[in-house]
Amino acid sequence: MAMAEVAEVRSGWGFPNAYQGQAEGVYPFYKVSDMNLAGNETLMTSAKNFIDKATVRKLGVTPAPARTVIFPKIGAAVATNKKRMLSMPSAYDNNVMGLIPGDQLNPRFLFFWMQTVDLTKLAHDSGAVPSIRKSEMENLQVPIPPLEEQARIVAILDKFDALVNDLSSGLPAEIAARRKQYEHYRDRLLTFKEVA
């Protein structure tokens, strides 16, 4: 199915300098650089900027719900292929795009499936900077197995993810091998090929 049929594709908002720099507030306001903060490798839990409800109204922001999948949509950051999930209702700037899963999509399934999507292949170099158009993302075809199957896949990948990211055990070569194995199984599960 097309992404637009199973998720809302939402671009971010302008974030004028005058509103940046608040260390606390009701909503985090994420920038692409926040994806690099320690602890934000999967779930966005830290932010450098926050806004309050009055600022939300002034900027015309509609905070995205927790479990929205976000990623860079413009510039060199697209090539980093970073995908993250929001841990709470949040705003994000206009260099970020979000996917808000509907009832047919397990949010973690969408997050894991997006790991298999190469953002650079969706980006257009129509100007000086690569960018992902909302319409391109809305037309991206997403596999939609039954919710029970999505939950089963998520459970498997969550266990594998925990094993791979347990950096306290193993040598660097072993950790790299675990990551490669994880990516292999993730990709096989999410393309619905038999896992051998």
Image (cartoon, grey):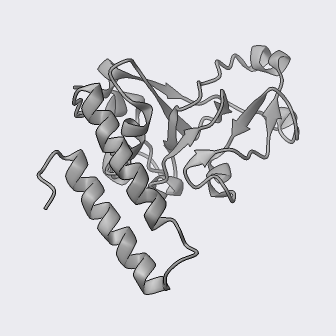
Q: Quadrant of the N terminus?
A: top left
- Snapshot quadrant of residue 57: top right
Above or below, 79 against 25 in this view is below
Report the number of discs.
Answer: 0
Q: Residue at x 24, y 29 (%)?
A: 144
Q: Residue at x 49, y 81 (%)?
A: 170
Q: Position of residue 64 (x, y in %)?
A: 59, 25
Q: Quadrant of the C terminus?
A: bottom left
As drawn, is 38 to the left or to the right of 10?
A: right
Q: Position of residue 180 (x, y in %)?
A: 33, 70
Q: Residue at x 59, y 24 (%)?
A: 65
- Choose between 93 and 153: the one closer to the eye: 153
Residue 58: in sight, yes or no?
yes
Q: Residue at x 44, y 77 (%)?
A: 175
Q: Position of residue 62 (x, y in %)?
A: 64, 18
- Snapshot quadrant of residue 109: top left
Residue 123: in sight, yes or no?
no
- Snapshot quadrant of residue 106: top left
As drawn, is 156 to the left or to the right of 194?
A: right
Q: Position of residue 105 (x, y in %)?
A: 35, 26
